[in-house]
Image (cartoon, rainbow, N blue to C red):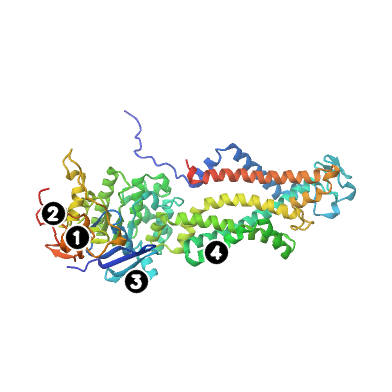
Amino acid sequence: MSAAPVPLATVEPAQTPWGRFWRQFAESRLAMLGLTMLLLIVLVALFAPWLAPQDPYDLTKLDLMDARQAPGAKSMDGLTYWLGTDGQGRDMLSAIMYGLRVSLMVGVLSGVIALSIGSVVGVLAAYLGGRFEQIVMRIVDIQLGFPAILVALILLAVLGKGIDKIIIALVTVQWAYYARTARSAALVERSKEYIEAARSLGLSGARIVLRHLLPNALPPLIVVGTVQVAHAIALEATLSFLGLGLPPTEPSLGLLISNGYEYLMSGKYWISVYPGIALLLTILAINLVGDQLRDVLNPRLAR
Amino acid sequence: MTAPLLEVRNLRTEFATRDGLLPAVADVSFDLVRGQVLGLVGESGSGKSVTGFSIIGLIDPPGRVAGGSIRFNGEELVGAPPERMRALRGKRIAMIFQDPMMTLNPVLSIETQMVETVLAHERVSRQAARARSIEALSRVGIASAAERLQQYPHQFSGGMRQRVAIAIALLHNPELIIADEPTTALDVTVQGQILYEMQKLTRESGTSLIWITHDLAVVAGLADRIAVMYAGRIVEIGDAGEVLDGPRHPYTRGLLDSVPAATAPGQRLKQISGSTPSLLRLGAGCAFRDRCQRAGQACGTMPDMTAVDGRSLRCHYPLDAVREAA
């Protein structure tokens, strides 16, 4: 007998919740497709200044002679307009790349701010309870009672145009969703025994809320977050289309669509349609990722 | 005779409900000597858990400790400022809960949860806290403690999680551990191991233990003293062996007879007829009188705790000292 001694107990390597989460997420091909698309879109948006053939914000680069060129046309100085040009002679491909930048930034930034405000308010409401909870949750109810687009339109009419203004409007519209989700998630977690156990160990209230309550209430917030970012991007596009969102000098996808609207009937479809497709793909990608997140993070579907 | 570690006097804990005040614990008094194990026995809703939570100061609204006194090392805990209670909790009084699946935070590693418990009460380095955690895990019989420390709760079995929970409770060498049915959710063999560990640990460290359970078999092997609770009151308290061998209160007797082992095989199992009364409609008399075969005229008034040879009981018609033939 020369067999090596067999260890009695093998300890499996520490398996983080994140590792498990990733394996479950990767099970769906559709979600991976969505994630790939989303990553590509984000990369394009991030590196637009280096990738785009033209700087659409630099008016000196634009040539009115090149206005409303069909996709594939050559410019005066030899550049190919793969997706055509708009009414000012802007290369649509470049304009879409820069537009994605604006749309994504507005969507993500407003989403993150709304998520922060909403989750803090919601978790506090659940933890403190009492009058604070009553007042906050009634405000949330009222907020959610109004159509989002109406609230945003009123706000923008008062505040005026600009990226900061539209982010304020989107945050105002969205924080209530996060607050409601955070509160219900925190209420469920708060009644669990590990919170009681944490209290029995003499941990401070702030530590229990931040370290124990919030991370456990996070999964539903992430799911709502992805859906809400897609909503924010769509809402921003709608507002820009209506001429209320961003200034025309820094066009977002919505504004690009709106710019091409007047030419749509004369057969110059590309000015509206390509930004529209870009918008569609972005929202689709986010939603594919969001759907899978919801399936993976939903405790009722837990495998 | 040294002063007891814990003196509970006339403790009353109430919960405000839609239907009125619910006295979950009423007029509970007992002493706990250092190093002693007290078994707190009773059915569901008898107030045994609420008693434990009252001592550690974790009664949340709508509940409140409405009266009485809890003295820990001579220090009054009823009405103590929340900051003081927080300093005691986890440090000198620790609690172990029923369901080990639920008491560990699923998203934090064992290391995080143990280290934060150490740091909540002591200013030591993370390394020192980590070393303490590893030592505590080894003490409760967890092999490869250093590797196990980095794992997450879902990588532990139920029994192992309860060992982790016990290790966390032991981190600061508390003087009192309140264990709220810590073995109920475990299977019998694991239950045996945990009981053995607890017994060993309390003996080694001189920690006092309040073991809350509905399982008489568990207390029989573990407790020095037993307090039997019914409808929010202690009905009988005394030396564990004496109470189990010769119960004087009809309810204790009924409980003991309900243990299946007390009945010969093939015979019908014994039970206490009727069910626990609603705490909202107790009335003035003894809460057990409607289910008690010995109940008489006097039971219309609540009996006081009376001391009878070394134990206290709350009954007008106690059983004789010698166990009657069943």
Q: How many labels, in total? A: 4
Chain bearing tag 1 is: B
Q: Residue lying furthest front in this view?
A: B297
Q: Which residue is mark 4?
A: A136
Farthest residue, direction top = A1
Q: Is residue B210 left or right of residue A67?
A: left
* Same-chain status of marks 3 and 1: yes
Kindly identify which residue carries mark 3. Answer: B79
**Residue A200: percent from left, percent from top:** 37, 60
Dot 3 lies on which element? loop
At 58% from the left and 51% from the top, the residue drawn is A224
- Mark linked to residue B246: 2
Q: Chain of mark 2?
A: B
For this view, does B219 lie left or right of residue B82?
left
Residue B51: tell me if it is visible: no
Q: Three-letter amino acid code at disc 1? A: Ile
Q: Nearer the viewer, residue A187 or B114?
A: A187
Asked if labels 2 and 3 touch by Cβ distance under 8 angstroms, the answer is: no
